[in-house]
Amino acid sequence: MKIPTISRKWKSISVIIVGMFGLSTLSFNCAPSLFQAASYNLSSTGLGIFSLDNIQSKYSLLSAEQSYQTMLNVTGQNLTGTAAQQTEYNQRFNSLGATNNLANLTGSLMLGSTSVAGEVCNGLVAKEKALAADARRFFRGINFTVRPSDNNLAAFLSAVDVLAVSAWGRNINAEEQVLFSQYFEEFKANLKTTNNAQQTDNLCITACSAVLSSFDALVY
Amino acid sequence: MSHVFAFALLLSATFCPFAMAQDSSPQGQAQWLLERLTGVKWPADSTQVNQVAQKISAGDKAGAADIALSQPQFLNVTVKQFALQMSTREENLQVPFNDFTAAFMGVTRDNTDARELLYGNFYYKADPAKVTLNAMDLGNDILMSNRHYQELAGRRDVDVGASLIRVEGQMLVAAQGDQGVITSMVPNPDPAGVLTSRAFLAAHATAGTNRRLVEYTFREFECIKMPEWSDTSAPDVRIGRDISRAPGGDPTKFQTSCKGCHTQMDGFRGAFARWDYNGSANDGFPGYAGVTQRVDSGVDTDPTTGSKVVRKMNRPNFIEYAGGFVTKDDSWINNARGTANAMRFGWSGDSTGKGVNSFGRLIANSNRFPQCMAKRVWASVCKYDLPADQADAMFVSLGLNWATSGYKFKDLFKAVATHAKCRQQ
């Protein structure tokens, strides 16, 4: 699968976003929950039978196996996974969650999750492409026989929304809709000479991967 | 994929899931219940979510939980992870599937008494009628290595939980010939469920002085760390010769510090006096290849005492205090009977015994064992800690109900997951 080459602009954005992600999740938005979920300590004190271990978060990190099984489950694929999916999972296993501790949600974990999600989404697109448009669950409005620029934004956003309902348990919000719209336009703009039907697969795979490896998809 | 990663980060940065309100509709409750019991997320429009939601709408929470418990992921993800964390010293999820974990999954699936995990004479392996593996040999693939379990876990086309079969009678390698070839196997004369599983012994009987076996038995099955049940007022007659009575020249330090833990560990460790683990790193998993051994099935006896205990129990080349206790058999004594510890553990049965089986029975029949399992299941499903003033009462209550109903893990998972306080609002 050929993915469009990363541009300098995207590299810059990545650096900024990593910083944004760190700040927003570790300090401003989620600080109390995240820091309170430091560990599972199953010990006890000498006074009470079981102590307060200070875990107050409503959410936990999915472990490696949970992440992989979840990606397959929410995309309606066979839980055994394909050979390629299994290989990708095995290669990324050590960078995925070793515990359910939210404090272990790191950049390398998200990068590993993105790789596994890519292969899971590859399987999903292959599966859905083989179906008639109205028999598909996720990519109903997508025409895989034409280039991305011949697909419309509404169909793309609709596919993302169905993915979000499956993986996040909710529809995409307005802010996310703007982000995905921008992504759709930038993807088309950056294609240049490789603007063929294969790139429609890639557009769907990358959008699906972004949904499956985002923060909301990696916690439960 | 780098730009996809960046995009995923951007999505992550724009919202915070902690700010989202809990969906308390039947559909929302159903999704939460399914996710927490199966360990994986489910599409909101899936058949399973709808079935669970219908049960919740009808006020049948237990029936809703039963649907979740019947999903293969309950055993293959939730119970597997529950046990994996307890099976090795690392206590994380990135350890290979092993015999300890298989036993937990099997006992849960078969709805048998969970106390047997600490004293039963059985193990679980892949049912050859359901799955064909290359590593099926009892000696080479189960007793001498972890290959059987690792191959089984790697088979993504197999429902591992459903493919396990209970085998009565634990076995041991009795003798090995050239190149480590097994020449004879014998029934385990002192079987104790997962305490004599290869994974647990590989984790805690390798090297050391077998004190770690006691420490981790309490850590995993009584949910207590060693310093928390130390007791300097307990007798020190069982403390071994390798422990100095005046560390750094200060006898007070021994009396006020060292003694507190060693009186407990050394009192119990006699139970493991005949067990050793001869580990090597020949199957790509350092410290996890090798064989569990007993002195009465092939390991050398202690040359200084002539007794059938492993040499590391008495450490003849590391004597710090010649008047210390010399282990000559596998007897143990429970020194955790002071006022605080007696209340904490709620012992029943004898305070002395011989071997791991009787030690396992002591732990399994303590009041604290079901409370500890309740606490572990709570952590596994609810994912948060109760305030201290509620935790004791909660785990005592859940543990008592679980014990009364026969120590079936499915009952405990169901009771915890459907408890009003499990899902934070």
Image (cartoon, coloured by chain):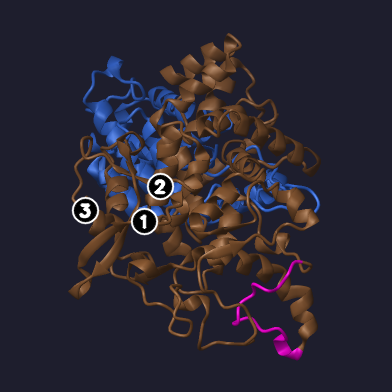
Q: Position of residue A152 (x, y in %)?
A: 37, 25
Circle 1 Cα neighbour tier, 10 Å, few/some/many (<14 / 14–19 / ≥20)? some
If you read the primary sequence from the N terminus, does the residue marked by circle 2 or circle 1 appear first?
2
Residue drawn 29% across the image and 62% down it: B173
Q: Which chain identifier belongs to the blue chain?
A: A
Task: Name the chain letter of the residue that bears numbered label 3.
Answer: B
Q: Position of residue A163 (x, y in %)?
A: 43, 28
Quarter containing the C terminus of chain B: top right
Q: Amino acid at mark 1?
A: Asn
Q: Secondary structure at mark 1?
A: loop
Q: Colour of chain B?
A: brown
**In-image side of A84 versus B79 (left or right):** left
Mark 3 or mark 2, which is nearer to you? 2
Mark 2 — residue?
B121
User: Looking at the rendered structure, which numbered label has been put on residue B342?
Assistant: none
- Foreground residue, A175 or A212? A212
Mark 3 or mark 1, which is nearer to you? 1
What predominant SS class does the magenta segment belong to? loop
Q: Secondary structure at mark 3?
A: loop
Q: Are marks 3 and 1 in contact (CB under 8 Å)?
A: no
Question: Which of the 4 image quarters holds residue B174?
Answer: bottom left
Mark 1 — residue?
B188
Q: Secondary structure at mark 2?
A: loop
Q: Amino acid at mark 2?
A: Asn
Magenta segment: B234-249
Q: CA distance from mark 3 to mark 1?
A: 17 Å
Q: Count up the numbered dots.
A: 3
Task: Name the chain letter of the residue that bears numbered label 1.
Answer: B
Question: Which of the 4 image quarters holds residue B283?
Answer: bottom left
Q: Are marks 2 and 1 in contact (CB under 8 Å)?
A: yes
Mark 3 — residue?
B137
